[in-house]
Image (cartoon, helix red, strand yellow):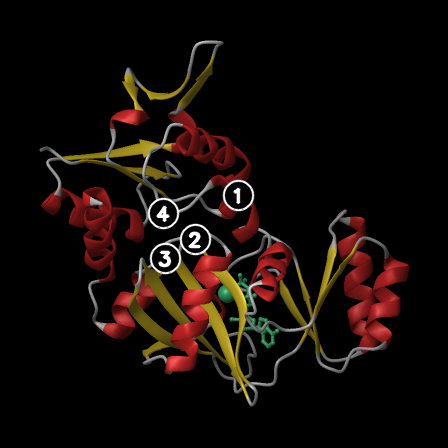
Amino acid sequence: MVMKFALIGPGAQPPSYTTQRLLEEARKKFKKTEHIPLIDIKLKINNKEIDALYGKKSLKEFDYILPRIDSKRAVVGYPVIRFLDDMNVKKPYVAETVLIAHNKFITLQELAKAGVKVPETYLTGSKQSAEEILKKQKLPVILKILSSFGGKGVLIMETKESAMSAIEALQTLKQEILIEEYLPNPGEDIRGIIAGDEIIASYKRIAGPGEKKANIHAGGRGVAYKLTSEMEEVVFRSAEAVKSSLLAVDMIETKDGPRVIEVNINPGIQGMEKATNINVAQRIIEFVESEMKR
Ligand SMILES: Nc1ncnc2c1ncn2[C@@H]1O[C@H](COP(=O)(O)OP(=O)(O)O)[C@@H](O)[C@H]1O
Ligand SMILES: [Mg+2]
């Protein structure tokens, strides 16, 4: 049987490192590998059927579809995944996962419900409520934009005055205000990637000098790191909580054990491949292959 695989990508030209690597590994394994730009998909509804088309092809024809939907495209991506849910196409997660994973607060809600430890976090829309929350917080305190990435929407505030002025700025941008407990740590965050029932790679990001955020974009560097069994358990539970079989889980190790700060359904793999020397793209595609055969 000819296995048909498609990757739904953001349509960026040239494609990102991760997209290229996944396609390269997929082409080695599958007779048919298609790269479909998200915006070119046509969703069709009438009273007989629903369908998702690319050119003349129905996405039903594929044995597995790997979506790479970043947070900027979640609004366009959600209906596509929802169609694939209804069309019974195999893929790593359900439509609901897009909504959970691209909202840092809802992510923490689902994780906490599943018994995964998270930092104490609040969400509110008004300055006054934010002020009431802030009064009770220890310093530093973290403010986050709900759908940010690369460390760009994360503010670590050392004083309540600076936190309040940042909140005012967020308000003028009509942004909701996420206020999060700062977890004391040496400027490190730990990422594990799970595919099915296997953790395929893990590493640690260490913040650059004078920086508290460990993102590579913020000057951090990645080093290979083996998860403790407690962390592995956290990764498994998190994937279950957000209903994704393929997921990156970011943790901070505290004196009370690991806490999850965010998950990523669309992880870039360049930093991880470099730090670990693991062919992460190949492992993801091997997982896809095993899913196709199920
Ligand atoms: N609750 C927290 N306590 C301590 N440091 C944090 C916390 N949340 C985030 N950070 C630091 O800020 C970085 C970026 O935060 P994160 O929530 O991962 O946002 P992004 O999606 O932009 O990566 C993390 O890698 C970590 O180093
Ligand atoms: Mg992060």
Disc 3/disc 4 C-alpha distance (Å):
16 Å
| Circle 3: residue type | Gly
Q: Position of residue 9 (x, y in %)?
A: 35, 39
Q: Residue at x 23, y 56 (%)?
A: 281
User: Which is nearer the eye, 216 or 233?
Assistant: 233
Q: Disc 1 marks which residue?
A: 96
Q: Position of residue 58 (x, y in %)?
A: 30, 21
| Circle 1: residue type | Glu
Q: Which mark is residue 265?
A: 2
Q: Residue at x 90, y 60 (%)?
A: 128
Question: Which residue is the extreme one toward the bottom?
Answer: 255
Q: Disc 4 marks which residue?
A: 92
| Circle 4: residue type | Pro
Element carrying mark 1: helix
Q: Earlier in the sequence, mark 1 or mark 3?
A: 1
Q: Residue at x 46, y 52 (%)?
A: 243
Q: Could you classify mark 2 by the number of other residues whose Cα lies within 10 Å: few (under 14), some (14-19), or many (20 or more)?
A: many
Q: Quadrant of residue 261?
A: bottom right
| Circle 2: residue type | Ile
Q: Disc 3 marks which residue?
A: 268
Q: Position of residue 45 (x, y in %)?
A: 48, 15
Q: How many marks?
A: 4
